[in-house]
Amino acid sequence: MEQGAEGEGRQSLVNRSVSLSRAFEGSEGIAAARDLARAFLTQVQAAHGLAVSGRALGMVQLVVSELVTNARKYAPGPCLLTLEIEDGAVLVSVWDSSTTLPTVLPADPGRIGQHGLEIVKAVCRSLVVHRAPVGKRVTAAVPLDDETGRGAAGRGR
C-alpha cells in the first residue's frame, strides 16, 4: 500500500483498488490471517483516511477466521486469503483446493458446531461461492461502517 501526495499523504480510493493477498498453511495460519486483516485495515485507514468502524474491524477478523478455518479444515494444502476494499466494504476472499462447495446449514440452536458460514452470512452484505479452475473461492463483503452494516443480514446474497 503506497502513500500518495493527495492531502496529508493520503490517496483517494475512488478510482483505485487496494488489496492484499497471502497464502496460509497449517492451523497457525488462522491467527496470522486475523492479524493480517487487522493490520490491512489499520494501514488503509491511516494511509487513505478510510473510515473503519470498530464493528467492521471485528467483523472482518471474524469472517477471516471462519473462512480460513473452513479452508484449512476441509481442503488439502494451502489457502489464499485476499482482502480488497470495494464499494464501502472489505471483500474477504479465501481460495482453497477443494472442489466441494460449502453449504450454509439452516439455523439449528441444537446443533453443535458447523455454524461458521451461518454466522458469516448473517454479518456480511453478501456471501458468494465460485468454482475456480482448481478448487473454489468463497467471498464475503463486510461493510466498513456501521451505517452500511445495518440490516446486512437481509441484503443481497
Image: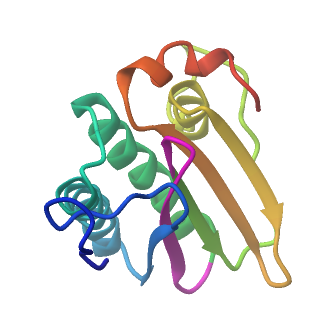
In which quadrant of the rendered view does residue 156 lie? top right
Percent across and percent down for residue 98 are 73, 73
Q: Position of residue 81 (x, y in %)?
A: 49, 71
115 horizontally vs 106: left or right: left
State the scheme by which the image is colored: rainbow
Q: Which residues fall within the magenta stretch?
A: 76-90
* For residue 116, above or below residue 36: above
Q: Is residue 82 magenta?
A: yes
Query: Is residue 28 or residue 150 the one in the foreground?
Result: 150
* Residue occupying image coordinates x 77% and y 54%: 129
The quarter of the rendered structure image containing the N terminus is bottom left
User: Residue at (72%, 30%) from the top-left corner?
Assistant: 105
Q: From the viewer's perspective, is residue 27 above or below residue 155?
A: below
20 relative to 124, above or below: below
The answer, for residue 101, to whether it is visible in the render is: no
Residue 49 visible in the displayed image: yes
What number of labels is visible? 0
- Look at the magenta stretch and give its main secondary structure: strand
88 within the magenta span: yes
Q: Is residue 25 left or right of residue 125?
A: left
